[in-house]
Image: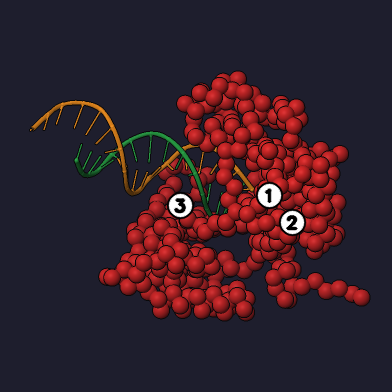
Chain colours: A red, B green, C orange
Amino acid sequence: MPSQIALVDCNNFYASCERVFNPKLRGVPVIVLSNNDGCVIARSNEAKALGIPMGAAMFEWKPLCEHYGVKVFASNYELYGDMSQRVMNTLARFVPDECLEEYSIDEAFMDLSHIPAETLLEKTRIIRARILRWTGIPVSIGIAPTKTLAKIANRFAKRTPGLNGILPLLDEKMISAALRKTDVSDVWGVGRQLTKAYNAKGIRSALDLSQADERWIKQRGTITAWRTQRELRGIPAMTFDTQPQTRKTILCSRSFKEAVREKTVIQEALALYVSKAAERLRAQQSYCGVLSVYLSTSRFQDEEHNYANACQITLHGETSATPKLIRAAQEALEQIFVEGYAYKRVGVTLLEIIPRDRFQEDLFIRPTTDDDTLSSLMDGINKRFGRNTVRIASAGHSQMLSPSEQRSKRFTTAWNDLVGVKL
DNA sequence: TCTGGGGTCCTAGGACCC
DNA sequence: TCTGGGGTCCTAGGACCC
């Protein structure tokens, strides 16, 4: 029996989250901005209709937004993360654990192969309605024999009004028709480079790609490209990962709102990012063995004033202790900081991550248990009393921490921001 | 003036070994 | 000293995704 993979995708997720707690936003254009309010990372349908593209630089679109009364929000990841969990928890009620893959903050794959074809549509309708009712988030569902085809089915489900957000794409005729109408650049796994190469070969639609010479695909490109082609032909070639994955790298970085020349400001920001990364590391019960810091000026600048560098440090024994990681990061920064540049960005990456339970105590390098315990204790306090109740002094008190005024409230994760109801 | 942040996977190529 | 092919391991960086 062919498999039936559903892709459940939240519509305009961040914009929809903003709407859940603010009904006035229904029917009006809403956009959500990236850090520093730099560019657009989510748009409601009304905003899309105004022609605002994904990733648009805000300064270019500000006049239009003002003219049409677009509601503009700074991103509120605490809210989005919590709403995401609610959606996933709702989905988890419908299928066994091994049939649910949380793919991203706003998408999940479900293996519905066990559901009889006759009841499939009805079942997915129930799922969709339940999510909307329990969380307020509208979703689209595409169902097909492979993940890549489910992605395509989802696109149509989302764009075609008559479908009510659901499209099963299971028989061959329908699949071909859908592939014919899909540009090759819109296929999952086909980015700009592959599009260029495919177009040069006369491959324009997803159907063209599925019918292209397999040997050519294999030999010119990567194994991933070949997998994509097989998936378009209805042959599953991607694994279904149901385990909540522990990260293999953890990265934290931000652009500065304005370029920075002083080393102390960069040190302070770096300490803050290391703290955040270390928190995530401990949350997934891991240690890391290597830390890397990078520093760069703006990419949008003439070469003469451009500088970017990174420095990697192998830690003396795996750790998850914030103070130890901050020390290593500052050491790395010393290596690459050059006086005289206007820096736009600094960041840290934790690598060589291993789970705590697989940690083998080294005979010569004793793990820094005490430091790790202290850091975990801080996590506990912060979880109970709110973020940043306690933090490392070097992480400073700079304005970089203060939430943007345009940010919505943390409706679901902060008592003070709970919505009141009049009876 | 202004243009995000956080990931994964794969490949090429160098170092090294037999 | 140099011959040549084959293998592994590691890392940097590209490509892609949301």
> Where, quadrant-wise, is the C terminus of chain A in this rendering?
bottom right
Gap between marks 1 and 3, in whole Å?
Answer: 41 Å
Q: Quadrant of residue A21?
A: bottom right
Q: Considering depth in this image, is A155 or A323 the residue closer to the camera?
A: A155
Q: Residue A153's x, y, as percent?
A: 73, 38
Gap between marks 3 and 2, in whole Å?
Answer: 47 Å
User: What residue is disc 2 on?
Assistant: A94
- In the rendered image, residues at marks 3 and 2 fall on the same chain: yes
User: What residue is disc 1 on?
Assistant: A110
Q: Residue A246's x, y, as percent?
A: 52, 59
- Whether pointer 1 and pointer 3 mark residues with C-beta atoms closer than 8 Å, the reply is no
Tell me the mark number nearer the camera, choosing from 3 and 2: 2
Residue A126 in sight: yes
Whether A363 is drawn above or below A71: the answer is below
What residue is at 50 percent from the left and 75 percent from the top? Answer: A376
Q: In this rendering, would A364 be left or right of A31? A: left
Q: Earlier in the sequence, mark 3 or mark 2?
A: 2
- In the rendered image, residues at marks 1 and 2 fall on the same chain: yes
Gap between marks 1 and 2, in whole Å?
Answer: 9 Å
Q: In this rendering, would A161 be left or right of A377? A: right
Q: Subunit of mark 3?
A: A
Q: How crowded is the residue under tag 2: few (<14 C-alpha within 10 Å), some, or many (20+)?
A: some
Tell me the amino acid under the disc marked 2: Phe
What residue is at 67 percent from the left and 41 percent from the top? Answer: A3
- Whether pointer 1 and pointer 2 mark residues with C-beta atoms closer than 8 Å, the reply is yes
Tell me the amino acid under the disc marked 1: Met
Q: Earlier in the sequence, mark 1 or mark 2?
A: 2
- Helix, strand or loop at label 2? It is loop
